[in-house]
Image (cartoon, rainbow, N blue to C red):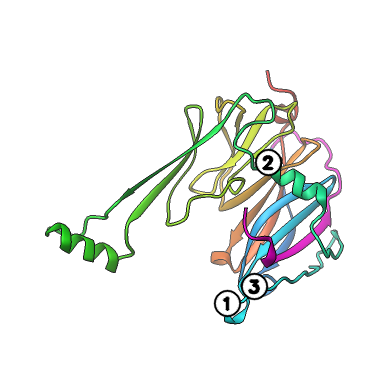
Amino acid sequence: MMPRMLAIVFAFVVAPASPQRAVERDVVVSITEAELRGGVVTEITWDGGVLVLQGVFVAPGGELKADYLVVPAEGVELRHLTVQPQASLEYWSLKSSRLSPTGLGRIESTSDSKLPMYGVGTLEQRVRDAQDMGGVQTRHLLRLGSTVLHDRTAEVPPYDGETYSWSPAELNRLAYVDGKGDLWVAMADGSRPQRLLRGDFTLPAWSTDGRAVAVAERKEGGKRWDIVLVHLPEEFRQPAR
């Protein structure tokens, strides 16, 4: 989990959704790059019916600085926070665990690094070329059983909870975002994966009542973040069979 000293925390109340017969989505709030001080959204958690967002930024000069903002949004009741609620912290601990709440599934990670191939030359020349073009490439994979949850090539691997969220234990499922940013749901052992939505999503957070998944959607190359509430079809809101 990201350092908590660099946190901008937002909280807003989400009204209960009526039953949905198909995948529907609502943008409940948009957060601009300026409101995040050039940072990024790093956590979405639930505190009962309240969504709590954490943003991380680096203050001018590189020093650590905490700030807390309230972002107004039509139809959304926002309140200022001085600290992150204990229920929000406990939620993140559960949703970001690599072991499912029922113990049925465990997420495994692997990383594979290699030098990119730039033309033909000696190993020494290829090392220099790789450094000039961005260095060693590392591929990071997250798996649940035989299902690849997330596959990306980046310097930093996904942190626990960044790309997945366990459902309430009685539903026995996992919501996750693949390397393209699409939102999926699978059984807690990784079987029967189904794509819900295509997009550029991150930070899925399954609601504690089991009815919805909140996600952050990057817009305009990260200059704006939409917090989206995805209302789950009935089949995903019933105990798994």
Residue 241 sits above or below residue 108 on the image: above
Residue 158 sits above or below residue 176 on the image: below
Residue 241, position in %: x, y?
68, 17
Q: Which residue is mark 3?
A: 64
Residue 93: numbered disc: none
Which of disc 2 and disc 1 is earlier in sequence?
1
Name the secondary structure under disc 1.
helix
Residue 137 sits above or below residue 79 on the image: above
Residue 16 in the figure: left or right of residue 24: right
Q: Nearer the viewer, mark 2 or mark 3?
A: 3
Identity, as a three-letter code, of the amino acid under mark 3 = Leu
Kindly tell me whether residue 24 is visible in this rendering: no
Distance Cα–Cα, label 1 vs label 2: 31 Å
Kindly tell me whether residue 55 is visible in this rendering: yes
- Is the Cβ of the residue at disc 1 closer than 8 Å to that at disc 3? no
Which of disc 3 and disc 2 is earlier in sequence?
3
Q: Which residue is mark 1?
A: 62
Q: Give the extent of the magenta segment.
A: 1-22
Residue 162, position in %: x, y?
59, 49
Residue 83 is drawn in which quadrant?
Answer: bottom right
Q: Residue at x 70, y 36 (%)?
A: 22
Q: Which residue is mark 2?
A: 95
Residue 106 in the figure: left or right of residue 43: left
Disc 2 crowd, CA 10 A, few/some/many (<14, 14-19, 20+): many
Task: In this rendered view, identify the residue nearer to me: 37 or 194.
Answer: 37
Disc 3 crowd, CA 10 A, few/some/many (<14, 14-19, 20+): some
Name the secondary structure under disc 2.
helix
Identity, as a three-letter code, of the amino acid under mark 2 = Lys
Q: Residue at x 84, y 39 (%)?
A: 18
Residue 190, position in %: x, y?
55, 28
Distance Cα–Cα, label 2 vs label 3: 27 Å
